[in-house]
Amino acid sequence: MADELAEYRRRRGRETPPETPPGKPVEQGGRFVVHQQRTPQLHWNLRLEREGVLVSWTVPRGVPRAPDEVRLAVRIDDQPPDYTDDAEVWDHGDYQALHWNDHRVELVLHGERLRGRYALVHRHDPTAENAWKLTRLDPAEDGHEPTPRFLAPMPAKPGPLPDADAEWAYEFAWSGLRTILRVTAGRVTAFDETGEDVTSRYPELRGLGTQLGATEALLDGEIVVFADGAPDPEGLRRRAAAEGGEARGLRHRHPVFYLVSDVLHLDFRSLLAAPHHERRALLDGLGLAGPHWQVPPSHPGDGAAVARASRDHGLAGIIAKRRESPYRPGSANDDWIDVRHETR
């Protein structure tokens, strides 16, 4: 099986920069920087060094990575070359200008993340004179796969604790609502097990998208409501039935928590074929921790000890996952086992 983890990390590093298209005259170039800012709302500022200043655009949904994505770019004030704005540097490098006037800017970016030809085109909208369109002109990079809208969660098959303990990892069973989160350009969309959009039920999860920033992901996890440190089925039922204003009104009485257990797609790469332990390593590397979301631990080996701890916490059981197992959307099989505690 191909090492999906190594492939993902390789592609996050610098690759061969794109070449200037033959026959295109090259105008003045310089350095560029993309600043990522999380307040007041997540957005990105593309800044191009030209004639002693940083010519700048705000891109609310981030720089596109594929030619079929068209993003709004709003022209903002130029800044001095040493301007930092106390923002995160999401990408930086050099650029070549192939064309530049008041209506169209065409350039080649040679960055650590962004590589290829892009165009900024003025929209000539009398109601929004600073509005431009930002598009990618080159094909997407090799292996680019858009983040799926939804994938059916992989269910666990009821059964006993596995015998070959070292081949398995164990997680608590939270008895929550399986929920797939799609995070793109800092925006979170939540889907239930059937693929229904349930985003309006869980406004607490919006901040997860801000935390991920430009990282795009499809996550698998459970929505849980707690009371006195234990899952609260009645509180969960009330939250699952509420939307919009009613859901916002219940946030303090019955706050929800998203417990993330898997990552299915990450930064335009499918992870379905990657073994479970590699997906978990990538998930842990995202650093997801917030007031309403976290990544509970996955324990390799010693399922009996995890089961005892689960019982001590008043939980219904544990989930055993074969460490080498791929993710099979919607397919129950012997790779994932739902181990329930015996009733006394």
Image (spheres, rainbow, N blue to C red):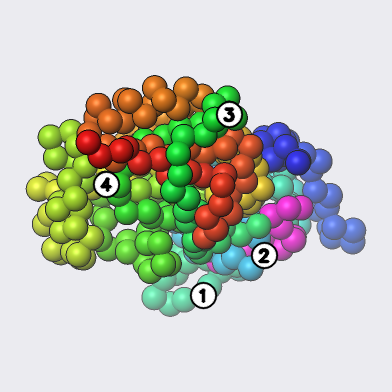
Secondary structure under tag 4 reads strand
Type of the residue with mark 2: Pro
Secondary structure under tag 2 reads loop
State the separation of the CA atoms marked 1 and 4. 48 Å
State the separation of the CA atoms marked 3 and 4. 31 Å
Secondary structure under tag 3 reads loop
Secondary structure under tag 1 reads loop
Would residue 283 appear left or right of 268 to someone viewing this image?
left
State the separation of the CA atoms marked 3 and 1. 66 Å
Badge 2 or badge 4: first in the primary sequence: 2
Badge 3 or badge 1: first in the primary sequence: 1
Q: Are marks 3 and 1 in contact (CB under 8 Å)?
A: no
Tag on residue 164? Answer: 3
Between 261 and 158, the residue placed more toward the observer is 158
The range drawn in magenta is 133-144
Would residue 196 appear left or right of 152 to someone viewing this image?
left
How far from the left and from the top, in percent, is residue 182?
Answer: 46, 56
Task: Name the residue furthest right.
Answer: 22
Badge 3 or badge 4: first in the primary sequence: 3
Q: Label 2 neighbourhood size at 10 Å, few (<14), some (14-19), many (20+)?
A: some
Residue named by callout 4: 224
Q: Is residue 143 magenta?
A: yes
State the separation of the CA atoms marked 1 and 2. 21 Å
Tag on residue 124? Answer: 1
